[in-house]
Amino acid sequence: MFVDAAEALLAWYDRSARTLPWRSPPGMPAADPYRVWLSEVMLQQTTVATVRAYFARFTERWPTVQALAAAADEEVMSAWAGLGYYARARNLLACARAVAAAGGRFPDTEAGLRALPGIGAYTAAAVAAIAFGRRAVVVDGNVERVVSRLFAIETPLPASRPEIAVATESLTPATRAGDFAQAMMDLGATICTPRNPACAICPLRERCAAVRTGDPARLPLKTAKRARPQRHGTAFWLERDGHVLLHRRPERGLLGGMRALPSGPWQADDPGLTDAPVATDWVSLGHVAHVFTHFALDLAVVGGTATVDVAGEWWPVAHIGEAGLPTLFAKAATLARATFAPDPAPSYPAGVSA
DNA sequence: CAGCCGTGGAG
DNA sequence: TCTCCAAGGCT
């Protein structure tokens, strides 16, 4: 009965598979494991539309896992800038180096893949199935939605995950496991969508328990999420001789390992000029609103001119676009360049100190 | 287990 | 404007 559902889904996939740069067409030999792995990591909590350009740049610049493993940390972090969840980039590089050190071949089993940095249960199963043809139970957000509806699972997420895993296992065929996994994800992305699912053209329509209830879009149920608090912070745009002061953020934590403008604490109330890199006449340049996963930030941007050297990295203002700033600070930089007029270069007579 | 961790687009 | 969320992983 459930094998029958897999056959119906695969038949649909043979006709309707999306064409994607990291994917081999239905029935064709598996794609390069490096490309499958890279795409899967990029696609974690990230849309296909967003990933396309990054995937193209990464594979152009680093065509193999060995090439990526040999890249400098800073180059990879900058190339990842804007994609978000920067721990992925750090783990990506660590994983590439582990694979390269072990001979350059990815493990071809779920357990072997699972042991690598940045590869969790989903990605291990997906790569094992898609790149190596292993039968693996691949459950991502799409599959959770499709299976919740197919079986009319009333338990809310995330408590329903064990139930969903069992149900998915019962559907997964012995062969074409990679195509099956991608078919489930394509179905979730194009037909069994979160809102307004296109049940009328769904290949599993006749087998879907939620369709029989008359309101498939109601599922999956989800437990309520916490409200997102508002925080306030200040970023410092400090110029000197056409350069701006940048810092490298700590490896762990928010925007970890990324270049950034110096900034003070991000807290419930306005921190003002706390943690300013120098004491100078800061002028207000405006505000940037930015939303992170678990809080919203109102970032005040202030500008100043340095007359002395300050610890950090002085980056040419004209080339700030190449600094690899995460989006929050890229927004702040754009605002600063549009509104800040630095003091003229100090021209004190030689031998006279200010 | 629940909190932490980005971003941009759709509705 | 605001809410939801997209091929999750780590601690």
Image (spheres, coloured by chain):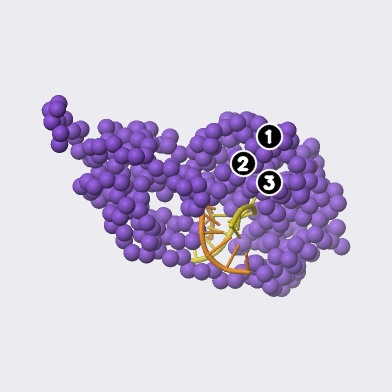
Chain colours: A purple, B orange, C yellow
The answer to which image quadrant residue A306 occupies is top left
Discs 2 and 1 carry the same chain letter:
yes
Residue annotated with mark 1: A100
Residue C10 locus on image (x, y percent): 61, 53
Please name the residue shown 58% across and 47% down the image: A88
Instruction: Tell me the chain of label 1.
Output: A
* Distance Cα–Cα, label 2 vs label 1: 10 Å
Discs 2 and 3 carry the same chain letter:
yes
Residue annotated with mark 2: A94
- Give the residue type that dot 1 points to: Ala
- The answer to whether residue A187 of the structure is visible from this angle is no
For mark 1, does the 10 Å Cα neighbourhood hold few (<14), some (14 to 19), or many (20 or more) residues? Answer: some
* Distance Cα–Cα, label 1 vs label 3: 12 Å
Instruction: Tell me the chain of label 3.
Output: A
- Give the residue type that dot 3 points to: Leu
Residue A1 locus on image (x, y percent): 87, 62
For the residue pair A24 and A158, the one nearer the viewer reads as A158
For the residue pair A58 and A265, the one nearer the viewer reads as A265
The reply, left or right, for residue A179 in relation to residue A159 is right
For mark 2, does the 10 Å Cα neighbourhood hold few (<14), some (14 to 19), or many (20 or more) residues? Answer: some
Residue A74 locus on image (x, y percent): 50, 36
For the residue pair A352 and A104, the one nearer the viewer reads as A352
- At mark 3, the secondary structure is loop
Residue annotated with mark 3: A116
